[in-house]
Amino acid sequence: MTYLRLAVLLAAATLLESCSPVAVAEAPNGDHTVTSYSRLFGLKETSVENREAALDACGVDRPIVFDEKIGSDPNGLYRRWTFGCAAP
């Protein structure tokens, strides 16, 4: 029983570690920036994470992506979107 609990805890820790950290910021001009870092699932998953963050910030069908940058920094590989929100 103890072995099973340990295995479950290790599996949960692995899943948490593989999540993409997401940072969202708003510029003074009203534009938004969202940056997702790639972990276990790769850069494709960062696009999904950025889309979800943009939808949270703007609402359904309202984000407009102005710029997309893929790069790396000390935190790892990232995908960064600069976007605005369409008027309702």
Image (cartoon, grey):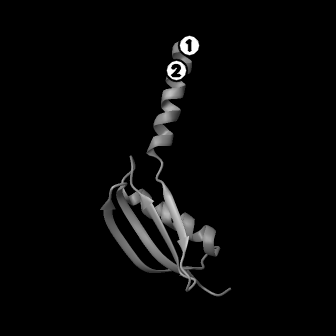
Residue at the location (48% across, 28% down)?
10
Check the image and report above or below for 12 versus 66: above
Type of the residue with mark 1: Thr
- Of residue 31 and residue 3, the one placed in the foreground of this image is 31
Q: In which quadrant is the N terminus drawn?
A: top right
What residue appears at the point 65 percent right and 74 percent down from the top-left corner? Answer: 59
| Residue 68 pos. (x, y %) | 39, 74
Question: CA–CA distance between discs 2 and 1?
Answer: 6 Å
The furthest residue to the right: 88
Residue 34 coordinates in the image, percent (x, y): 49, 68
Mark 2 lies on residue? 6
What's the amino acid at mark 2? Leu
What SS does tag 1 mark?
helix
* Residue ranking furthest to the top: 1
Q: Secondary structure at mark 2?
A: helix
Q: Do the numbered discs 2 and 1 sit on residues whose CB atoms are within 8 Å?
A: yes
Q: Position of residue 74 (x, y in %)?
A: 33, 55
Image height of 32 relative to 76, above or below: below
Within 10 Å of the Cα at label 1, are there few (<14), some (14-19), or many (20+) other Cα atoms? Answer: few
Query: Which residue is painted at 62% across and 75% down in the image?
Result: 58
Q: Is residue 87 above or below residue 27?
A: below
The image's mark for residue 18 is: none
Which quarter of the figure has residue 30?
bottom right
Residue 33 location (% of width, % of height): 49, 73
Q: Nearer the viewer, residue 22 or 28?
A: 28
The C terminus appears in which quarter of the rendering? Answer: bottom right
Judged from this view, the residue extending furthest toward the left is 72
For the point 48% across and 54% down, which residue is it? 21
Q: Residues within 10 Å of mark 2 (few under 14, many from 20)?
A: few
Residue designated by label 1: 2
Q: In the shown orientation, is residue 59 left or right of residue 8?
A: right
